[in-house]
Structure formats: structure tokens, C-alpha cells
Image: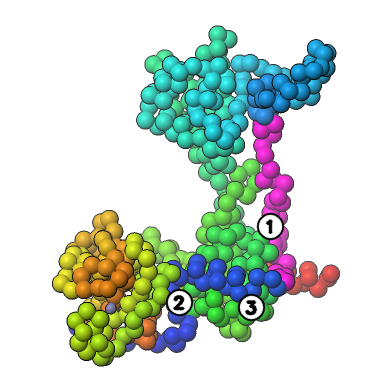
Amino acid sequence: MTSTAKAPPLYPKSHILAASGVAALLSLALLVFPTREVEAKKTYLNLELDNGSDYTEQPGDSASLAAETPQSPFANTATTNTSAADELKTTHVVAPIEADPLHQIISVQNGDTLSTVFAKVGLGASTLHEVINSSKAAKQLTRLKVGQALEFNLSPDGQLESLHSKLSDLESITLAKSETGFSFKRELVKPEVQTAYSHGVINSSLFLSAKRAGLSHSLTMDLANVFGYDIDFAMDIREGDEFELIYEKKVVNNRQVGTGNILSARFTNRGKTYTAVRYTNKQGNSSYYSANGESMRKAFIRTPVDFARISSRFSNGRRHPILNKIRAHKGVDYAAPRGTPIKAAGDGRISLAGRHGGYGNAVIIQHGQRYRTLYAHMQGFAKGVRTGGNVKQGQIIGYIGTTGLSTGPHLHYEFQVNGVHVDPLSQKLPMADPIANSEKSRFMQLSKPLMAQMDKEKSTMLALNNQR
Ligand SMILES: [Zn+2]
């Protein structure tokens, strides 16, 4: 069967980059051009985004600060040498307009615990005990964050009626007095998902230009990952490179609370334009494909360890440091600190996860019928990694160590094609599968309108720029 397997298309080595390494490379790119001026061109069109003022504190926060003022040491010092009238005046400046002792909002300060917060509203240890032990979920209340607002409702006799806290724009928790004690409820707001378009021209690094174009750090990382197999973001980026994308933004009450997936993108690097469309197949797996349906990712990532240094290359004859004999080195060594995660280079089935002679703790992965990768000298295996199991590309399989015949912490990595050892660094990596023929028309129904929409947004944007 193996002889009938179709040879994969070949791609130049320089164009292949493990998406997983992009994070490190981006940071590098940022360091390389730290001071040059960046100008990302006009970004948002028709899609008015929130400005910074929407991200300021909630109105409730001022009330919560005021509620705490009577306990503030400043209140005491300020009134030490003043008359009662002055004291009243001083207090009035900061006190809540309607102080309601039965409804108090406490803003969590540095060093606060649920116990100290309870004390501020006059609730004692027995109530605290009752609350925490009312349910397993209620223990979440003990995980306080500085600035978090806790809204207390008390009964006229000072007993806790309810406690409410908004953890984020999307999540809030409520504890309420019930007949049996307290009931705890966690509420999730489902954000509305809208799409946004963004465009930028790179004058220095992708990071700076993307920031100027209004993209968050994580969205920029996503963009780099989408094109990470084709563009080396540390080496290949040039002034004038251009990117545009349509992505999901999450909105609650007309306020952007986050972003979702990149739906489509285009990246022009040194005059060559790459396209990407996110597609979820009928099995429910999402992946990026070029606009005409080729896979964006390769079947293998180039380097199974991030932040590693190649300490020994593939060779057909070298002196083994321990055996002191001339021996072929049938793999590549990556030196990295003990405990650094090692990732599966591609999807596959684990044919071995265990001790393997001089390899020490080793994992061997079979990728289809043609390819096999081996990872040696591991300190240990990742959870769930065992012989006979399946792994996904990029999944952590174990950690750098120095088990077996090894002189120091490193990964010894081997790559086999049809049972023959090859140099993984010179190997032309095969593409992952393109869109299945049975799904091609469904894919094109998604891809074409997205590309057309980017064309339209861009020409509108250029027209607007020309008017200025
Ligand atoms: Zn080695």
C-alpha cells in the first residue's frame, strides 16, 4: 500500500515554520525593530468599535469606594483637628449620596479575603462558614480579585440576604438566602457575535502594525499562526507587507468584550499574497485553508520544541560522546532546559511510549503509513500519552530530560519516511489534506463571499483614504 501513496507537493524550506514557534519569533521581530515609526493605515470600516472610555470602571465602583471611606485611615487623620461641622463637611464630600446600610458594595482591596470583606459589612465568622459550606460551587466566592465588586443585601437585622458579584462582562455569581441555607448561582451572558474587518500595512513589525490596526495581542498571534507555515515572521517580514482580516467580535450591550475566530485573512508578504479561510468540516473539525481549498497547515511542524537550540544535526558519521565510536547521528538534537514541553510533530498513533534502551524514555509516533517520528531522552510523559493512543499535531507528549544514553537535557528527534531515517531539517514537509472533494462546494460557498467582502471593505477604505 505504501508504494501507491501519492507524493506530497514540495515546498521550499524557508517557507515552512512551525506555527508553535511563532510566539517566540514574533517577540524577536519586535525586538529587531523597536524604535522605528509604525503607521498602520485606516483600520475599521462601518464597524464602529468602542473607544477606550468604554473600558473604564463601572458606575458602581465609585459607590463601593465611598462605602469603604469611613474605615479609611485618611478619614480619621483629616478630622482629628477639625470641628464637628468640618468633620461632617469632610465626610460629605466622599460619602455615598444615599448610604443604605442594607445594600453595600465592597470593592476588594489588596490583601482582602472573604473574611475581611464580610467583616466590613458586619458579617461574622459563622455566616462566612455557612456560606462557604453551603455548596461546593460557593467556594468560588473565596477566590477574590483586587477590584472585584461584591454587592451585599442585608436584612434589617444585619443578616446576609444575598451576595452578587460580576466576575467579567460575561460572568456573574449570586449567592442567595434560601430555606435550607444559601443557594449559589453562576450566570453566563452569551455575547452577540458580530464580524469586524481590519487592515494594516507593516512599517516595522507585525506586532506594532497590528496594534495600530486595533488588533489585540491574541488576535495578532492567531493571525501569525494562520500564516505560520508559509511566512517566517522573524525573517520574512518587510516594510510594505500588508494584512487584512475578517474576525468575530463578541459584544455585550453594544460593548466589545472580546474577539473570536479569524474567519478569513489575506497576508501579502514581499509581493506574494496568501489567503486563509476558516472552515469547519462535517465532522466538526475547524481548520484554515487557502481560498481555493488547500490546507494552510503542513502535516508536520518543523520543530517539536519551542525555544530550543539545535545542539547536534543529522549526520551519517560522527563520534558518539559516550560510546566514543564513530556513529551516524540519525536525528537532530534540541537542547532545552529540563521540563520543556515536547510536542507531537503531526497527528498520529503512539506505537511506543516507554523505556527504549539508550533512548531512555521515548515516544514513537506513526503518522499514516509513510511517516514515523521518535522523541528520546524524555524526563517523563505527558498525561494520557500511552502506547496505542492517538495524538494531535502540537499536542504535548512529554518533557525534556536526559534519560538513557545522554550527556545533558535535550530532545533527540528522529524522522523516518518509509522506514528510512531522513534529516527532519532538510525534509520537505508534506501538506496536510486539502478540503475533501465532498465538501469542496460547501467550502467555496463560504470562501467566495468572505474574499469578496474583504475586497469590498478594502476598496471602501482606500476610497475614504483618498478623500482625505
Ligand atoms: Zn541525538
Name the residue type under label 2.
Answer: Leu
Is disc 3 surrounded by few (<14), some (14 to 19) or many (20+) residues within 10 Å? many
Instruction: Name the spot of residue 123 as percent of width and height, x first.
Output: 52, 17
Q: Mostly what secondary structure, the magenta segment?
A: loop
Q: Is residue 8 visible?
A: no
Which numbered disc flags the more N-terminal residue, 2 or 1?
Answer: 2
**Foreground of the two, 369 or 310:** 310
x, y (%) of residue 429? 37, 82
Query: Can you see residue 27?
Result: yes
Q: Disc number at residue 17?
A: 2
Alpha carbon separation for disc pair 3 and 2: 18 Å
Q: In this rendering, is residue 233 above or below 400?
A: below
25 sits to left or right of 63: left
Report the side of 337 relative to 61 (left or right). Answer: left
Residue reaching furthest to the top: 157
Mark seen at residue 47: 1
Q: Where is residue 158 in the image (x, y as percent from the top left)?
A: 55, 12
Q: In this view, does 432 lie above or below 388?
A: below
In depth, the one of 391 and 8 nearer the eye is 391
Nearer to us: label 1 or label 3: 3
User: Does the segment drawn in magenta span residue 39?
Assistant: yes
Q: Give the range drawn in magenta.
A: 37-62
Q: Earlier in the sequence, mark 3 or mark 2?
A: 2
Quick check: 235 left or right of 463? Answer: left
* Residue 241 badge: 3
For badge 3, the amino acid type reads Asp
> What secondary structure is marked by label 2?
loop
Q: Residue at x 45, y 80 (%)?
A: 16
Front position among marks 3 and 2? 2
